[in-house]
């Protein structure tokens, strides 16, 4: 039996890499200083795994920005627009690399960044490779070899982690027509062969190919590519030990394909899809070993040793211990680094958790327990683990009978408004008296350095609650006055009291806790610190009424109440694993429902429930979509449906394509939906048009992700495009998303132009 790790977090346990990269980008440190930080993180990670007793330690899992971009650089998939960056003297390979990641605006050049998108169903984002017809590839960077050599110096014969050839192609995008990216496999193969030759000559014995697409729906062409590529690699390198890893889903219908590949070890994710074990044991050939992903790489819970051991024993019985590997389910990139830093967590809860460093230990302990050679200490670990698991099952911190009872007694009526949209629309028109093309914003206004400094000071005790409150009120009032002055129809309070749209609610709900240092890489140097949902969720008291009521008291116009929806709160948190996600989501939905009703009682007549993450929650396999959408849509409706017809419910979504889920979006039955649209030139709206979406809709007319101020004419143009496909009496006018990352200067100009465009449209109508 052997242990291995698919990949370790590379941001550094105190986000050293984030800080060093940002300093390098702003010119505060030189290249050599950045490289020193990178090398030191690598060696810390290696030593930590070595000391823990891991058998196969990965290298090339480190990255200065993104592992897919690393691969693009290594194989020379460098779009021509960056070639000039490489030619500038003083620019290193890393400068070229960062230019691809972040764009390049100096030395008289102005080059956009490569596109970024989500890594499967995680919150990690990768840089999308760009592919062209007949593209040629060439070994261009020594990164992999340098890291291998670095590990060797540390006394480790590391296992280089390489994105498998087929997955690498599937991750990319064809940038011109007339070819299929998989056609490039023939051109790319020689570079993979070069990489392996060189690693082999450096003394590498193991190679890990990440092929997550093997666990997804595959076309025939992709299946053929797998067979072709691995046959060729095997033929060229009969002596290297190949590990192919799959994760985030089960092999399912691709099992026979995966089992037929001429590789040595196949890794499967038994957290996401435990059911695949039996099938895998039944069908893998004798030449193949199985790597069992039994420690959850995507979540923060302690492993249940008893459960994992039963899986390992089953595998050992069937395959013999030499053919069994023990590992986390996927790369630990998606886990925070080290629980030891969490000094503020309640000790009972902390005892249920394991971050990356702790997970490495778990893998080793599982091997020892499974080999039955365990010494006294390991047996003690086992006893403690059993106790933590049983404590968690019965803890009063987690289990709240009232919450469970309420969730169990939800009826269909709870997710239905009193009347259909056509009836509500009339009632709302009478009650709200809004003009044609009503204008609004998505919620937040600029969170200036000043606003953030108040919060920081308040947290440090340098401002009293009263002082903090006064400052926020002033800012809110100023924002209300300003919106009135430029003629916006539905006002917002500005969300100044919020640090983050999920954290703000999590902090006020029971069942949530927060870490001090539980950072996970989101993209490049950006990290997120998701809340931990550990128990039954309930709302001890109103969360937003105070601020909405205050804002409404300052004006005669409508102020929109602003909430984060249950699916988004779920999606952007670490979620408990002792009940289905749908159940946790329902509990959050009930808490939000109470909030919606309290807002209504307080006189708020328009309430927005943001669900930007509803689409990203979609399962990776299409067959699972409807099940997810059913409970996700139901959760939204539970939160939204407890109000009178006259109360208008809005929802908001961004970074979404709606084509394949438009029916479900319509089922959410929000009175108004606002969506991000401007960058796609209203293309995203077509899904709504084709579906004849009946409710009201506010397609974003300006891109808030850029400081650029759009002109009135541009927005008029977009509005016309919207009118071409959606009846005017269904249309709202608003920006793409919240304005919290913008500055006031550009925000003012843009919104004034937006209001002018809306007024003009209604005059012309
Ligand atoms: N109401 C939130 C805001 O305006 C919505 C943010 C989002 O969609 N991501 O900031
Ligand atoms: Zn948004």
Image: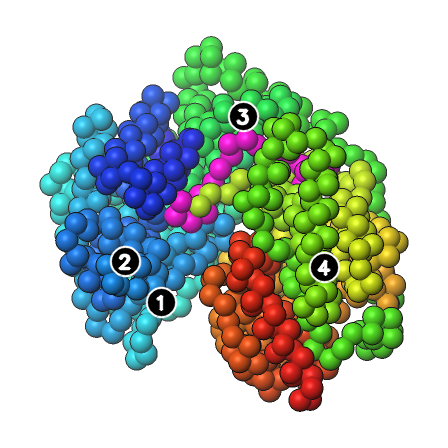
Q: How much space separates mark 4 and mark 2, taking CA atoms?
A: 40 Å
For this rendering, which residue is in front, 30 or 186? 30
Q: How much space separates mark 3 and mark 2, taking CA atoms?
A: 41 Å
The residue to which callout 2 is attached is: 106
Q: Which mark is residue 342?
A: 3
Q: How much space separates mark 1 and mark 3, taking CA atoms?
A: 41 Å
The residue to which callout 4 is attached is: 481
Q: Is residue 144 left or right of residue 563?
A: left
Q: How much space separates mark 2 and mark 1, taking CA atoms?
A: 27 Å
Residue 91: in magenta span: no
Mark 2 lies on a secondary structure that is loop
For this rendering, which residue is in front, 370 or 349? 349
Residue 439 appears anywhere in the view? yes
Q: Residue at x 30, y 80 (%)?
A: 178
Give the mark nearest the N terminus, 3 or 2. 2
Q: Quadrant of residue 44?
A: top left
Q: How much space separates mark 1 and mark 4, taking CA atoms?
A: 47 Å
Q: Nearer the viewer, mark 3 or mark 2?
A: 2
Q: Is residue 617 left or right of residue 367?
A: right
Q: Alpha-carbon neighbours of circle 2 within 10 Å: few (<14), some, or many (≥20)?
A: few
Mark 1 lies on a secondary structure that is strand
The residue to which callout 1 is attached is: 173
The x, y position of residue 375, in whole percent, is: 43, 12
Q: Which residues are magenta?
A: 505-525
Q: Nearer the viewer, mark 1 or mark 4?
A: 4
């Amino acid at each position: 039996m052997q242990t291995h790790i698919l990949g370790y977090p590379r941001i550094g346990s105190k986000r050293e890499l984030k800080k060093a990269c940002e300093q390098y980008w702003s010119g505060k440190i030189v290249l050599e200083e950045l490289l020193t930080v990178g090398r030191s993180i690598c060696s810390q990670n290696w030593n930590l795994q070595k000391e823990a007793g891991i058998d196969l330690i990965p290298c090339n899992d480190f990255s200065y920005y993104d592992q897919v971009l690393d691969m693009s650089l290594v194989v020379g998939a460098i779009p021509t627009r960056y070639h000039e960056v490489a030619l500038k003297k003083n620019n290193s390979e890393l400068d070229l690399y960062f230019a691809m990641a972040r764009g390049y605006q100096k030395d008289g050049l102005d080059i956009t960044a490569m596109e970024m998108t989500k890594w499967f169903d995680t919150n990690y984002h990768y840089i999308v490779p760009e592919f062209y017809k007949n593209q040629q590839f060439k070994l261009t960077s020594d990164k992999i070899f340098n890291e291998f050599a670095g590990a060797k110096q540390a006394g480790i014969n590391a296992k280089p982690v390489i994105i498998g050839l087929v997955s690498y192609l599937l991750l990319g995008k064809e940038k011109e027509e007339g070819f299929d990216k998989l056609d490039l496999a023939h051109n790319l193969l020689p570079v993979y062969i070069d990489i392996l030759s060189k690693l082999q000559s450096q003394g590498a014995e193991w190679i890990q190919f990440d092929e997550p697409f093997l666990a997804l729906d595959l076309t025939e062409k992709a299946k053929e590519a797998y067979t072709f590529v691995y046959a060729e690699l095997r033929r060229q390198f009969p002596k290297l030990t190949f590990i192919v890893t799959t994760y985030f889903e089960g092999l399912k219908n691709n099992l026979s394909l995966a089992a037929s590949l001429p590789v040595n070890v196949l890794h499967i994710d038994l957290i996401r899809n435990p059911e695949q074990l039996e099938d895998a044991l039944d069908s893998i050939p004798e030449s193949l070993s199985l790597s069992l992903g039994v420690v959850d790489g995507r979540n923060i819970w302690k492993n249940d040793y008893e459960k994992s051991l039963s899986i390992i024993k089953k595998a050992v019985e069937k395959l013999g211990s030499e053919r069994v590997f023990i590992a986390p389910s996927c790369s630990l990139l998606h886990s925070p680094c080290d629980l030891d830093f969490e000094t503020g967590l309640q000790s009972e809860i902390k005892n249920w958790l394991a971050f990356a460093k702790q997970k490495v230990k778990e893998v080793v302990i599982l091997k020892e327990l499974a080999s039955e050679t365990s010494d006294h200490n390991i047996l003690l670990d086992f006893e403690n683990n059993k106790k933590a698991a049983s404590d968690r099952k019965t803890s009063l911190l987690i289990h709240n009978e009232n919450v469970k009872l309420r969730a169990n007694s939800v009826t269909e009526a709870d997710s239905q408004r009193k009347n259909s949209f056509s009836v509500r629309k009339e009632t709302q028109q009478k009650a709200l008296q809004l003009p044609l093309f009503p204008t609004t914003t998505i919620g937040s206004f600029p969170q200036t350095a000043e606003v953030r400094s108040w919060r920081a000071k308040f947290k440090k005790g340098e401002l009293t609650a009263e002082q903090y409150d006064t400052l926020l009120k002033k800012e809110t009032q100023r924002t209300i006055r300003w919106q009135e002055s430029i003629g916006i129809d539905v006002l917002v309070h500005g969300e100044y009291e919020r640090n983050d749209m999920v954290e703000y609610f999590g902090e006020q709900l029971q069942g949530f806790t927060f870490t001090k240092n539980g950072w996970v890489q989101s993209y490049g140097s950006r990290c997120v610190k998701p809340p931990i949902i550990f128990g039954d969720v309930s709302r001890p008291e109103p969360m937003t009424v105070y601020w909405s009521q205050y804002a409404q008291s300052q004006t005669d116009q409508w102020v929109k109440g602003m909430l984060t929806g249950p699916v988004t709160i779920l999606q952007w948190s670490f979620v408990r694993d002792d009940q289905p996600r749908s159940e946790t989501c329902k509990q959050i939905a009930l808490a939000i429902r109470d909030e919606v009703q309290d807002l209504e009682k307080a006189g708020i007549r328009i309430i927005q429930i943001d669900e930007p993450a509803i689409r990203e929650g979609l399962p990776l396999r299409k067959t699972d979509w409807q099940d997810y959408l059913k409970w996700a849509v139901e959760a939204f409706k539970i939160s939204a449906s407890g109000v009178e017809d006259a109360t208008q419910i809005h929802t908001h979504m961004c970074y979404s394509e709606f084509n394949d889920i438009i029916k479900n979006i319509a089922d959410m039955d929000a009175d108004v939906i606002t969506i991000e649209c401007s960058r796609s030139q209203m293309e995203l709206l077509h899904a709504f048009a084709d579906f004849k979406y009946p409710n009201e809709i506010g397609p974003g007319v300006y891109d808030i992700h850029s400081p650029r101020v759009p002109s009135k004419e541009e927005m008029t143009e977009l509005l016309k495009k919207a009118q071409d496909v959606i009846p005017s009496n269904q249309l709202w006018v608003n920006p793409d998303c919240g304005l919290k990352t913008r500055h006031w200067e550009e925000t003012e100009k843009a919104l004034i132009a937006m209001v002018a465009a809306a007024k003009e449209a209604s005059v012309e109508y």
